[in-house]
Amino acid sequence: MRRILIIDDEDDIREVAALALEATAGWQIFTAGSGVEGIAIATVEQPDAVLMDVMMPGVDGPTTFRTMQQNPLVAHIPVILLTAKVQGVDQRRFASLGVAAVLFKPFDPLTLAHQISEALGWKEN
Amino acid sequence: MTLPMNPEDEAKIGALLISLWERNLPLLHERLAILDRAASEAASDHLSVALRAEALEIAHKLSGTLGMFGYQHGTEIAREIEVILKSSAIDRFHHLTTLTAELRQTLLGK
């Protein structure tokens, strides 16, 4: 069973994404409301991937990702950024950070697991 | 590993979306009121930096969530509001009043 950590400051996003991934893919989900909390959970739980919002108050997604990259305990965990940004320059900037993928909000809860699997090259049944 | 969608699970997600939408209606009203105020101040060329930043954050959040609840047009309007608030083209600020009214109509039907 895949284990995914969702980091987003929006309660709605966390709740919908968590239920959708549990229901559609049978994955185990952890959630965090901030980058700092997310890194702490990632360190302990060692999820298979992190799905993280770009724009969060305090420490944003890209900064959290860079912090993770400098921490050998979590640097190996693939990170997918989730963003509502639509401008091409933003998309290219996020992709150039070295994250595994960039997905866009609003997402379709019914196809989110498929998008994540595809982005990470995970085989689907 | 995507499992075939069980109709019960699909219904569960649908029910969660409806429940979240209803639970967050008061917050949505607050957010729309702030966008209205920002649009009004922008129309009179007196939009403060603080209100602009707050409205920008709200527009960003709405653009990222409304489509998830089935309001794809709401996402598009919120995105347009976000782009205008981020831009330095002050002349486009006058369009905000129309957009915020359209957003309210789309989401609340009034």
Image: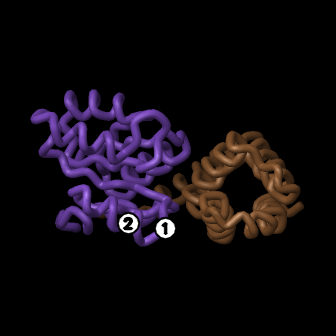
Chain colours: A purple, B brown
Quadrant (top left/top right/bottom left/bottom right) for the C terminus of chain A: bottom left
Residue B84 x, y percent position in the rendering: 66, 64
Residue A75: horizontal and vertical position, in percent? 15, 42
Chain to which the residue tagged by mark 2 belongs: A
The residue sitting at 22% across, 67% down in the picture is A124
Q: Amino acid at mark 1?
A: Val
Classify 10 Å Cα crowding around label 2: few (below 14), some (14-19), many (20 and above). Answer: some
Q: Is residue B21 left or right of residue A35?
A: right
Q: How many marks?
A: 2
Tags 1 and 2 touching, CB below 8 Å: yes
Name the residue rendered at 33%, 59% in the picture.
A94
Lateral position of residue A69 relative to residue A38, left or right = left
Q: Which residue is mark 2?
A: A91
Tell me the CA gap for discs 1 and 2. Answer: 7 Å
Name the disc covering residue A86, or none.
1
Q: Chain of mark 1?
A: A
Q: Quadrant of residue B98?
A: bottom right
Name which residue lies at 83% across and 63% down.
B97
